[in-house]
Structure formats: C-alpha cells, structure tokens
C-alpha cells in the first residue's frame, strides 16, 4: 500500500508533542474558565443574598402591615353591635368583674399568636381606669409581662396623647427601649381605649440566622440616625453595635416600609476570598495532575500498545501483500485474544452495572417516598395538644375528654401506620377525626361529610392522599364567614382498563385561586416559602406510586368551591399488609 505524496508524515514523537501542546492549551483555557466561573459564582452568591434579603424584608413589612390593619379594624368596630372586642371592653366600663371579660378577650386573641407568632405581644390599656392588660400568652403559657416593658409602653401612650397623633396603618412602627433591649411598638386608640402590639427586635433578627454570612459577616438593624439597634453575627444576636462598617460591594441594605430602620447584611469578604483561593489551588493542582497523567499515559500507550500494534500492522501488510505463508506470532495473536476477552468482560461488567444502577434507582425512589411521607405525618398534633391544654385550663373538661379521644385516634393512625398502603376506609376515618378535631375547636364553622361505597371499602391507597386536600379545604373554610360544606365520597368506576376508584373531594368555599389552580392543572408543585408543602409532597408521591396509571384533576365548581377529582386503579388491600401495619 502506497502513501500519497501530498500527505505529511510525522513520527510518533511528533504526534506525542502535538498532543502535549494541546493538553497545555486545554489546561490554560481550563484555568481561565475556572477563574471566570469563580467570579461568576461570587456575583451569583451576592445576587442570591440580595434576593433572600428582599424576601425577608417583604415578609417583615407584610407582617407589620397585617398587624397594623388588625389593630385598626378591631379598634374601629366600636359602633358595631357584633364586635366581640368592644362588647367585652364595655363590660369593663360597666363595673363588671374584670376577670370574665379579660379572659374572653385573651381567648379571642389566641388566634393572633397562631397567625403572627408568639413574639408579637398584644396589649390593652383603658385610660379611664388607668389599667394595662396583656392579651397575648407567652411561650411559657403566662400572661404576666415584664414590668419595665409595660412602663415603656405606658410612656409611649402618654407621648401619643400629648402629641395628639392620629392612628394610620401606613405610619411606621415606633421604637421603644426597655431593660437594655429595643422593641417595635404600634398603638391604636379610640375614645380612651388603646389597643397595641410590640415585638422584640431580636425576634426580627432570628429568621436571618439561616443565612450564612461568614465569620466577619453580620445582619444589622440600622435606625434613621445610622445607629445599630440590633446585630446578628456568627456568635449570635448582639444588643450593641459590634464592628458595623460602611456599606461596600459585599453588603446589602434594605429599607423597611413599616419600620423606622433598614436591614443591612454583609458577607465576609475574607471568607469569599478564602473559598475562591482554595478552589483555584485545587483546580491548578488538578490541571497539573492531568498533564502528568497525560504524559504517562502517552508513553505507556506508545510502548505497550502503539508499538505492538505497529508491528502487528506491518505483519498484516506483509500478509496483505500476498505472502500467505507468513504466520502471525503466538504473542501477537494472544494479545488480540486478550483484548477480545477484556472487551467481552467489559460488556458483562456494564450489564451488571446497569442492573445495579436500576436497583439503586428503585431504592432511591422508595427512600424518597418514605421521606415525603414523614414530612406529612407530624404537622398537626402539637397544636392539638396545646388546644387540649387550653380546654383544661378553662375548665372545659367534657370537650377536653372528647378532644383527647379523637386526637388519640388521629395520632394512632399516623404513628402506627408503617405500611406503604392503607385501606381507603382507614384514610376516610382519619379524615373524619381531623374534621371532628376542628369542629371541637371551631364549633359550627363548617360541615363535614365522608362516605365510602361498600364495593371499594377494601381498596388500597397511599396514606394521607385524601387528608391533605381535606385539610386544605378546612383551613380555608375557617377563614370564611359563611358556613362551608366539605364533602368526601369514594365510589367505584367502571372503565375499559378495569375497575377504578373515584375519590371526589369538594367544598362550597371560594375555590382555588386562579394562579394556584392553573399550576395544579399543569401538574406543577405549589410549595412556596413553607406553604402548601403537604399538597406538593402528595403530588410527588402520587406520581411515584401510580406512575401515570392514576389521574388527579383540579377545578372550581360553577356554584362555588374547590373540586379535587382523583381516579385510581382498584387494588385490594392485602391482609398481610394489614397485620404488618398493626404491629
């Protein structure tokens, strides 16, 4: 075989040199790209911090505004006969026993602790009686507040009276100092009745502890004079300013609309630089190792593979030229046989690896389903225990006894359910217990209806499939003034593929919001900032369990209310699974 004249021939050494030059060029591009990538990561980290700070700031402003609106709406209901707050306040003015109306007012404000958090303390001050009452319960279950904080609040009330200031929702909260700590305070008044709320500045800083700022980073509350009123560092929350510097490219400052201060956050520049330098050193060492490894591999290939192949090729050329009497050496044939054996062995290993990866993927899905299931289980029982405690505290022993029984059944279903599937009757009973708990807490707020057809009573479903949507409907029903009907029906459905189970969950409330309904109909998750986690997890588990064989439809009824329509293939619940779930 002749080689064309126009083709440039190169020796093996020249080929190796060219490969090494390419490796060096790739290394240089790799290093430059790594530096640019690290710079980009630094910029993205700062941008992410800015987005997180914007989220936290908006949440704080929103909470302050909601508290302000709540104070305004309650204090301005004086002329409305349906106002619960003013009815009990008037009892105090009419020389009634103060204990009864005060207990009722505190009971009325228990919901505020659920909505805004126990760190937000509501209080009442009657000017004609010169009496101060704390309406919010603290974390230890007490209504006794700190005396110095009470004096600071009274001083703020006197200041408002002297200044003749009017209440406005849009006005910023005031800062009061007491006992070496700072508090945010908002007070509304109407005809000598003052209703207000205060919160410790430290409570405002606590949510920011989840943001990693580095050793020298901080989150600081800065007042209008540029002074620190509270700082969060890697050592915790500090009352005084500790090394707060001027704003730079590693710091972000957000102004609160409802409070007279801004939030300044700073990432430790030294920490960012240390992380970047460590990455650069690692990448450089990796590149050097790649060059050395490449050189060693090239030499090895030349001596142990390329040269034997060249000799083998030359012998093949002699054989191809017509020298049929030429025999290949035993060594050369053995080398090819070994390559073939290795190749066959490699194919076998690849098949085994694919099986192993498939088994690992199945195990991963099982672990993920268990994890999602655990996320749903314990989200309700702490509130039940607190409510039972409140019933006993107020002497409602019969209600507490009923609440304890239903809660025990509710928790038994959660903690004794160790199987992946449960009968639909058990899930329906669990939903009924949940509704009964809410009806004990909020009598007459809604009606519940649960029905399971006889033909599908032994159908199996995964736990909490129905309860998640019943809970969502009940939570929204509690926010409505009109009485809502929550209905759950489970009926058989005949299809060409076989018997299906139709689970139909509906209510007569306001229905799904348009944006949430659109996302649900597209099959997207709706988890946002810790909300709707149960529904998002339920959708993921639904996909993992039924893998396209089940259907879940979301819609709003033309007559009002949300509808969740679920269609599942009928599978009978196994008896051995029942025994396993009971043990």
Image (tube, rainbow, N blue to C red):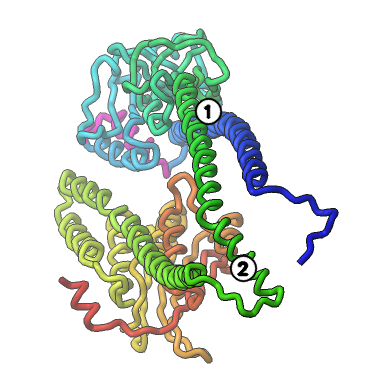
* N-terminal label among 1 and 2: 1
Name the residue rendered at 28%, 28% in the picture: 134
Query: Furthest residue to the right?
Result: 6
Distance CA(mark 1)–CA(mark 2) = 95 Å
Name the residue rendered at 36%, 16% in the picture: 182
On screen, 390 above or below 272? below
Where is residue 446 shown, x and y percent of the image? 39, 61
Give the residues in magenta.
82-99
Q: Quadrant of the C terminus?
A: bottom left
Asked where in the image residue 126 lies, by quadrant, the reply is: top left
Where is residue 519 shown, x and y percent of the image? 58, 58
Where is residue 172 shown, x and y percent of the image? 51, 21
Dot 1 falls on a residue whose secondary structure is loop
What label does residue 315 carry, if any?
2
On screen, 327 above or below 94? below
Report whether 239 appears left or right of 50. Answer: left
């Amino acid at each position: 075989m002749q080689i064309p004249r126009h083709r440039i021939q190169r020796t093996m050494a020249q080929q190796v040199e060219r490969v090494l030059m390419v490796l060096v060029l790739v290394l240089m591009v790799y290093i430059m790209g790594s530096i640019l990538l690290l710079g980009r990561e630094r910029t993205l980290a700062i941008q992410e911090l800015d987005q997180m700070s914007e989220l936290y700031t908006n949440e704080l402003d929103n909470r302050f505004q909601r508290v302000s609106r709540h104070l305004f709406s309650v204090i301005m209901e004086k002329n409305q006969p349906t106002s619960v707050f003013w009815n009990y306040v008037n009892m105090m003015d009419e020389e009634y026993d103060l204990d009864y109306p005060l207990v009722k007012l505190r009971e009325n404000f228990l919901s505020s602790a659920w909505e805004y958090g126990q760190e937000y303390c509501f209080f009442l001050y009657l000017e004609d009686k010169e009496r101060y009452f704390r309406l919010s319960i603290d974390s230890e279950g007490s209504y006794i507040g700190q005396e110095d904080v009470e004096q600071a609040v009274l001083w703020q009330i006197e200041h408002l009276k002297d200044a003749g200031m009017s209440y406005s929702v849009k006005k910023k909260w005031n800062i009061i100092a007491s006992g070496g700590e700072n508090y945010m305070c908002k007070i509304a008044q109407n005809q000598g009745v003052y209703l207000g709320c205060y919160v410790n500045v430290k409570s405002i800083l606590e949510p920011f502890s989840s943001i990693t700022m580095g050793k020298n980073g901080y989150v600081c509350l800065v007042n209008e004079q540029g002074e620190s009123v509270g700082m969060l560092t890697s050592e915790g929350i500090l009352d005084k300013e500790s090394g707060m510097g001027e704003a730079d490219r590693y710091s972000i400052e957000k102004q609160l609309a409802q409070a007279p201060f801004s939030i300044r956050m700073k990432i430790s520049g030294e920490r960012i630089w240390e992380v970047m330098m460590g990455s650069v050193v690692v990448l450089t060492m990796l590149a050097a190792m790649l060059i050395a490894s490449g050189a060693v591999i090239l030499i090895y290939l030349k001596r142990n593979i390329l040269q034997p192949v060249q000799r083998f090729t030359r012998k093949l050329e002699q054989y191809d030229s017509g020298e049929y009497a030429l025999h290949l050496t035993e060594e050369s044939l053995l080398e090819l046989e070994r390559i073939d054996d290795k190749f066959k062995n490699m194919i076998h290993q690849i098949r085994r690896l694919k099986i192993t990866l498939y088994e690992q993927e199945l195990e991963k899905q099982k672990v993920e389903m268990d994890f999602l299931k655990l996320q749903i289980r314990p989200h309700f029982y702490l509130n039940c225990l607190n409510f039972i405690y409140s019933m006993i505290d107020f002497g409602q022993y019969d209600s507490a006894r009923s609440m304890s029984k239903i809660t025990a059944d509710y928790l038994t279903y959660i903690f004794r359910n160790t199987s992946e599937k449960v009968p639909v009757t058990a899930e329906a009973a669990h939903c009924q217990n949940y509704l009964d708990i809410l009806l004990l807490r909020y009598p007459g707020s809604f009606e519940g209806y649960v029905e399971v057809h006889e033909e599908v009573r032994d159908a199996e479903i995964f736990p909490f499939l129905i309860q998640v949507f019943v809970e969502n409907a009940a939570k929204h029903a509690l926010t409505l003034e009109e009485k809502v009907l929550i209905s759950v029906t489970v009926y058989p459905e005949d299809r060409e593929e076989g018997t299906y189970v139709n689970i139909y969950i509906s209510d007569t409330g306001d229905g799904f919001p348009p944006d949430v309904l659109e996302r649900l109909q597209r099959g997207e998750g709706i988890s946002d900032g810790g909300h709707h986690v149960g529904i998002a997890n339920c959708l993921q588990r639904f996909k993992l369990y039924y893998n396209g064989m089940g259907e879940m439809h979301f819609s709003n009824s033309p007559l009002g209310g949300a509808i969740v329509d679920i269609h599942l293939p009928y599978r009978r619940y196994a008896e051995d699974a029942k025994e396993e779930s009971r043990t």
